[in-house]
Image (cartoon, rainbow, N blue to C red):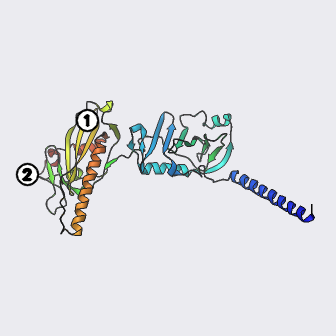
């Protein structure tokens, strides 16, 4: 072999060894723990389809459906997007303070395995039901700053101490989308109760009690309460309409609220053992929309909005007709108001 070929071979071997050493060092650096690194740095939240959280006897399962999530334990009732997003942000934001170790004895001491009533377990799956992540959060560090955490989906996964305390809820109620409707009092044109009617006069801003005696005054505060019934109307608990727990309830229509756009809602109420249950149905007084050739752009836009609102009411009834809502005493008292509650007995 000539000197030139020998030198060329040695150079190639040197470059190969240098490349191998560089790769090994880069891998070693990547695997080396760094304080402040993210626990789930490679997790893509858009790929998460199922979220299961367990703590003691409490558990919740969230399933992606369309653009949001539903709560499996509540027969697929919609989850609050803000609550789910906050959960995922908190999960992705878990930073690590230091590496602790591994082993059965250490896991038991740090309340990771076996889990205790305080241990939190989170499992994430993708669209094929393949497990993406399974982790457990153990007890808090002595001074309360940080928790011990371990991935169970990785073989011999290390236990770490997080940079800050980890709060991941397993409360079903905390994930439900509890707002049913939200219409400000300015949108309410008419309210019909069991024995009274409130209406806004033409060009008026306030609801007035119809047929109020001349020598009497209405309680403005109570009229305002009725006008605000649909403003952020929320529930405390939700049941499928055929749930055994609510069978036998007798619902009476308590309130009808007409909105300025021609739509509105009817609320029916039932009480049992100082609990208040509500059904809600939307309606639309606009039955037909006729469009002519000579209509202005503004008129066409208004009619398009009317048609859109009619579709919204149909969708609303298709969904909410399957559910019964338990509401607060405060909300129920507004719905139960009678004519006598609206008149100042001391006025003359």
Q: Within the image, what quadrant is residue 328 found in?
A: top left
First in sequence: mark 2 or mark 1?
2
Vertical side of 223 occupied by 274: above or below: above
Residue under the image location 26 percent in, 44 percent down: 280
Vertical side of 65 occupied by 10: above or below: below
Which quarter of the image is occupied by the N terminus? bottom right
Residue under the image location 90 percent in, 65 percent down: 4
68 vs 106, nearest the viewer: 68
Q: Judge left or right: residue 182 versus residue 39.
A: left
Residue 30 at what x, y percent from top left?
A: 69, 53
Residues tagged 2 and 1 counted as in contact (Cβ below 8 A): no
Residue 37 at what x, y percent from top left?
A: 63, 53
Judge whether residue 201 can be spotted in this image.
Answer: yes
Q: In the rendered structure, find residue 271 and report the number of the disc placed on it.
A: 1
Which residue is the extreme one toward the front? 1
Q: Within the image, what quadrant is residue 203 found in?
A: bottom left
Q: In the rendered structure, find residue 190 and report the number of the disc placed on it.
A: none
Residue 47 at what x, y percent from top left?
A: 51, 49
- The residue tagged 2 is 213
Vertical side of 254 occupied by 306: above or below: below
339 vs 248, nearest the viewer: 248
Judging from the image, what secondary structure is the residue with disc 2 in? loop
Residue 260 at what x, y percent from top left?
A: 20, 57
């Amino acid at each position: 072999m000539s000197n030139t070929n020998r030198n060329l071979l040695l150079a190639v071997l040197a470059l190969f060894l240098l490349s191998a050493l560089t790769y090994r060092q880069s891998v070693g650096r990547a695997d080396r723990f760094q304080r402040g690194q993210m626990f789930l740095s490679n997790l893509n939240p858009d790929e998460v389809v199922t979220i299961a959280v367990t703590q003691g006897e409490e558990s919740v399962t969230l399933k992606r459906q369309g653009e949001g999530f539903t709560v499996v334990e509540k027969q697929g009732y919609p989850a609050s997007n803000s609550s789910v997003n906050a959960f995922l942000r908190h999960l992705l934001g878990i930073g690590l303070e230091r590496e602790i170790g591994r082993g059965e004895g250490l896991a038991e001491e740090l309340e990771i395995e076996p889990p205790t009533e305080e241990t939190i377990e989170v499992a994430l799956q993708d669209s094929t039901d393949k497990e993406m992540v399974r982790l457990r959060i153990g007890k808090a560090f002595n001074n309360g700053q940080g928790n011990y955490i371990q991935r169970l989906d990785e073989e011999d996964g290390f236990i770490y101490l997080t940079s800050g305390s980890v709060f991941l809820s397993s409360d079903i109620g905390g994930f439900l989308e509890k707002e049913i409707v939200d219409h400000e009092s300015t949108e309410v044109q008419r309210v019909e109760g069991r024995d009274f009617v409130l209406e806004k006069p033409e060009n008026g801003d306030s609801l007035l009690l119809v047929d109020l005696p001349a020598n009497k005054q209405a309680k403005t505060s109570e009229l305002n309460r009725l006008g605000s019934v649909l403003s952020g109307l929320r529930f405390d608990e939700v049941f499928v309409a055929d749930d055994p727990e609510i069978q036998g309830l007798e619902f009476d229509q308590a309130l009808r609220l007409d909105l300025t756009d021609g739509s509105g809602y009817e609320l029916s109420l039932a009480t049992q053992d100082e609990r208040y249950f509500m059904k809600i149905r939307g309606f639309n007084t606009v039955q037909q929309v006729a469009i002519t050739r000579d209509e202005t752009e503004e008129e066409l836009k208004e009619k398009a909005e009317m048609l859109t609102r009619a579709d919204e009411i149909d969708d609303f009834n298709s969904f909410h007709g399957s559910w019964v809502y338990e509401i607060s005493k405060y909300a129920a008292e507004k719905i139960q108001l009678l004519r006598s509650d609206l008149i100042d007995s001391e006025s003359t």
